[in-house]
Amino acid sequence: MNKKALVEALSEMEVLLELDGANPFRSGAYGKAVRALEALDTDLEEHVENGTLTDLDGIGKGIAQKIEEFAQAGTISELEEMRSKFPEGLLEMTLIPGLGPKKARAVYTELGVSSVDQLRAACEDGRIAGLKGFGDKTARKILDGIEQLARFSGRHRLDAALKAALPILEKIRSLKSVQEAEIGGSLRRRKETVGDLDFVASTKEPGKVMEAFVSLDGVTSVIGKGETKSSVLLGGTLQADLRCVSGAEYPFALLHFTGSKEHNTRLRQIAREKGMKLNEYGLFPDGKEESLRAKSEKDVYKHLALSYIPPEMREDMGEVEAAGEGKLPRLLEQKDLRGILHMHTTYSDGRPKLEDYAEWAAAHGYEWMGIADHSQSLTIGRGMSIERVWEQHEEIDAINKKWKSKGVRLLKGVECDILKDGSLDYPDEVLKEFDFVICSVHTYFNLTEKEQTARVMKALEHPCATILGHATGRLLLARDGFPLDQHAAIRHAAKTGAAIEINANPRRLDMDWRLIPYAMEQGVPITIGPDAHRIEGLDDIQFGIAMARKGWLGKRDVLNCLSAEKFLKFVKEKKKRSE
DNA sequence: GCCGTTTTCGGCCCGACTGTTTTCAGTCG
């Protein structure tokens, strides 16, 4: 069964029910089920076969039945029925910022408007402004929303968002009236893509801060400006929100605006169970108007009898329960890493010379660098011929001699293409000369899921295959990955003793962090690779670490934290296991 | 539609801002 299609179908149910004016808790239940499915780190099909769907939190009898129907028939009869009630264009209309299901339904029933184009016309000729509950400003807002929808998908890559946010944070912090300020939202949680930028600040003069915020450089329009909250558009495409609170409220506000929404909901439920109310201003015991005090987020969690949950984990994927039982892992930190692997040099399509990486490692306190240039068949990446491999190995030996006293070592790796039939891109006698082999798919993306899965699994069976590189080949916001049964690939990695890479390049961040818990459960170790083609690309390791943290990884789970000798020992053991 | 030793009904997290109202609904996060 196609999980993505199922998620889309259930999401559509949610919107259609909203349009239909159904009980909001009923439509919301579909949203909750969708999140449960997205967070699912086990095999969906197993749940369907074993009839254990209702074990999942948020999936009850009704939705389980619909999932089973979808698995059988490929569609859901009630969905088909609902679809016939509303024209297709209405769904698209609800994507327009500022236009929700209620207004969409009103323009449809009152004016017969059933597409974005018709809606634009109705805004322009004044019909919208004439509707009850609508006005000139609403019509204009809808037009703006339509334009915004057409111009960009609404999401931004983590690296771009961070780059835009940091200078703004600096400016907010530099304001005299601001005491503390921080980035919140999905950016603080280090999601691989973010919708907008959120900032939280503590101040005694929110008006001044609001004024300064809406007049920042780069602000192209002001979406809203209130006494304590403002939203602006940066460069016409990126929305930024700032919320101001008092110093005492700040920890609660930071927690609230970091989210996720689902995490907050869980925290509020816990607060209620303890006879308290949690909101962005404080934590209030029932009947009292004064909040419990907190100096930091840590104190808020403490009041709820939870250990501190780092922002990256706040996705309601079991972290609240684990924090309640004191079972949160100690998350990976940059200082835990001893080596970095997966970088390209002038031997293939990278800009740095081999020795540049040795220098960088010495300057940044790393013990080893796993060089991994492209293999011979990837001509577009200037892959290495066998002769070039020998040349590179000689040069690495020479560099290692020179750098030994500085405690830096280059490892002779390769990013070896997985060919169409699942075989590797060099003969065995060449492969065995590498210290490690990252296997990656760069070609034939259009095979079926079954074929791709078999292809990747076969590659992992090769004794010399150490690591599966960027598992799906996805490019965030640009290209979907090729179809791959990642659960099966993970199980096969476990069986063959292979590791799986978190490709830290912010365009990829592949394998997806949501699959990491499953890899851990199966006992598959993880490597973090920047896939660097320039020296600056090595800084991308931070994004890989962030994904590792989102996947609850600690020092023990990540091969980068081993010494070079221990890492090579891992490679050897893998060879033995697959032979 | 989901959920449950306050359980099979009656709840379901909470608040800011906007635009339209004349006290509030809709949208968003």
Image (spheres, helix red, strand yellow):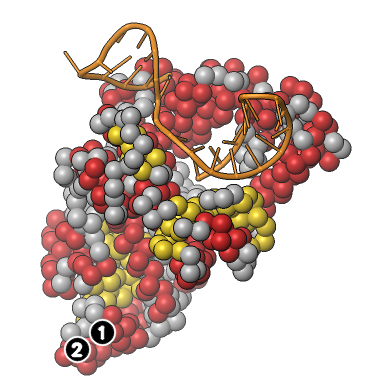
In the picture of the structure, the residue carrying the numbered disc 2 is A406
Image location of residue A549, percent across then percent down: 29, 55
Q: Nearer the viewer, residue A304 or A412?
A: A304
Quadrant of the frame with the N terminus of chain A? top left
Taking the image as drawn, is residue A176 in sight? yes
Q: Nearer the viewer, residue A419 or A297?
A: A297
Answer whether labels 1 and 2 touch (C-beta < 8 Å): yes
Which residue is painted at 75% across and 41% down in the image? Answer: A137
Q: Is residue A304 left or right of residue A241?
A: left
Label of residue A362 in the image? 1
Q: Secondary structure at mark 1?
A: helix
In the image, residue A236 above or below residue A97:
below
Query: What chain does mark 2 sit on?
Result: A
In the image, residue A98 above or below residue A214:
above
Label 1 crowd bin: few (<14), some (14–19), many (20+), radius 10 Å: some
Q: Is residue A387 left or right of residue A336?
A: right
Callout 1, which amino acid? Ala
Query: What chain does mark 1 sit on?
Result: A
Callout 2, which amino acid? Lys
Quarter location, residue A432: bottom left
| Labels 1 and 2 within one chain | yes
Taking the image as drawn, is residue A531 in sight? no
- Residue lying at the far bottom of the rendered structure: A402
Quadrant of the frame with the C terminus of chain A? bottom left
